[in-house]
Amino acid sequence: MQNLPSTVDLHTHSTASDGELAPAQLVAEAAAAGVSALALTDHDSVAGLAEARRASAELGLELINGVEVSSRWSNMDIHVVGLGVDPADERFQGRLQSQMERRLERARLMSHKLDKLGYPGMFEAAARQAPQNIPARPHFADALVKAGACRDRKQAFQRYLAQAKPAYVKTDWPDLMEAVRWIREAGGVAVLAHPGRYKLTRTKLDRLVKAFAEAGGQALEVSVATHGPEMVKQLADLAVKYELYASQGSDYHGPSMRWVQLGRMPSLPGQCLPVMTLLAQKVERARRVSP
Ligand code: AMP
Ligand code: MN
Ligand code: MN
Ligand code: MN
């Protein structure tokens, strides 16, 4: 399936997590790519939203406040995107702070494992490039490449950082239900991120989507740059089956991943209800409550 240009991109990253572009740069690139509605969805962080909002106002682009929360389900790391969350919500901020503490602890443990594997000083090397000096796995991957441990990021994940590899550390993220609750309590719409990337059988993917819907999840990321046509079809059918809205996003992390571009993804199948309609309804309702 071709990744066609779209004006809506609801999954992107900036330097506030593991993206390469500062929030204002990302917004400018999105506008240049023809995107008119953009969600910035950094991992466990809303720190980039203020800068992105200022840039979006100048460029006339609609910015949707987003986040991508790390969670656990059935012994796997599962990501839940929150769209339309309130970044000023103090309880939510506290919850994201607890995620940063988990990230910091995990980074220390990963560094310890890498030390034992013969790569000392990886925490410091990775932290230099990371927001709040809390490195995520891509920062470790870059540090490993620099240290000559592997050829590129991909190989760093394959050899050391991916689940079940020697430097992987299981993290006690909130479970999927809790992540959904955090997002909804912060006024957001909970979207199951890139369901096609978890390498699940049809049965298990069905179980995941069912659990997500029962937890109060509202939308599935049907259209993602890395989903092939069969996956898009399968997810569109699951969205209908469990009465979920459909979202679309590039999961853009920056120009160095050349095969992922802002605003480029498969188009949503006709049977899908775009999550933008739900977001628009929320905005309309809020307007009626406080004119
Ligand atoms: P973390 O949030 O620290 O668990 O890191 C997860 C991030 O690592 C994802 O959001 C991707 O940006 C990146 N990532 C995950 N798997 C891979 C992979 N196999 N190759 C390259 N990057 C990956
Ligand atoms: Mn990432
Ligand atoms: Mn993700
Ligand atoms: Mn992402």
Image (cartoon, rainbow, N blue to C red):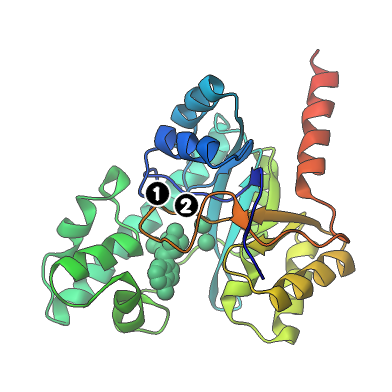
Residue 158 placement, left or right of 143: right
Residue 19 placement, left or right of 186: left
**162 and 142: which is toward the camera:** 142
Quarter of the N terminus within the rendering: bottom right
**Can you identify the residue that label 2 sits on?**
43
- Quarter of the rendering containing residue 205: bottom right
Residue 57: percent from left, percent from top: 55, 21
Residue 74: percent from left, percent from top: 61, 78
Quarter of the C terminus within the rendering: top right
Instruction: Decide: few, some or many residues near mark 1? Use Cα within 10 Å; few <14, some 14-19, many ≥20.
Output: many
Residue 30: percent from left, percent from top: 52, 40
Tell me what residue is drawn at x 82 percent, y 42 percent: 277
**120 and 57: which is toward the camera:** 57
Q: Is mark 1 within 8 Å of ligand 2?
A: yes
Query: Compared to 279, does 170 lie above or below?
Result: below
Q: Is residue 250 visible?
A: yes
**Can you identify the residue that label 1 sits on?**
17
- Quarter of the rendering containing residue 236: bottom right
Query: Compared to 168, does 103 lie above or below?
Result: above
Query: Compared to 273, does 204 lie above or below?
Result: below
SS of the residue under disc 1: loop
Query: Pointers 2 and 1 in contact (CB under 8 A)?
Result: yes
Amino acid found under the numbered disc labelled 1: Ser
SS of the residue under disc 2: loop
Amino acid found under the numbered disc labelled 2: His
Q: Is mark 2 within 8 Å of ligand 1?
A: yes
Q: Please state the total of marks drawn on the protein image.
A: 2
- Quarter of the rendering containing residue 226: bottom right
Residue 212: percent from left, percent from top: 73, 65
Tell me what residue is drawn at x 24 percent, y 50 percent: 129
Distance Cα–Cα, label 2 vs label 1 = 6 Å
Tell me what residue is drawn at x 86 percent, y 59 percent: 270
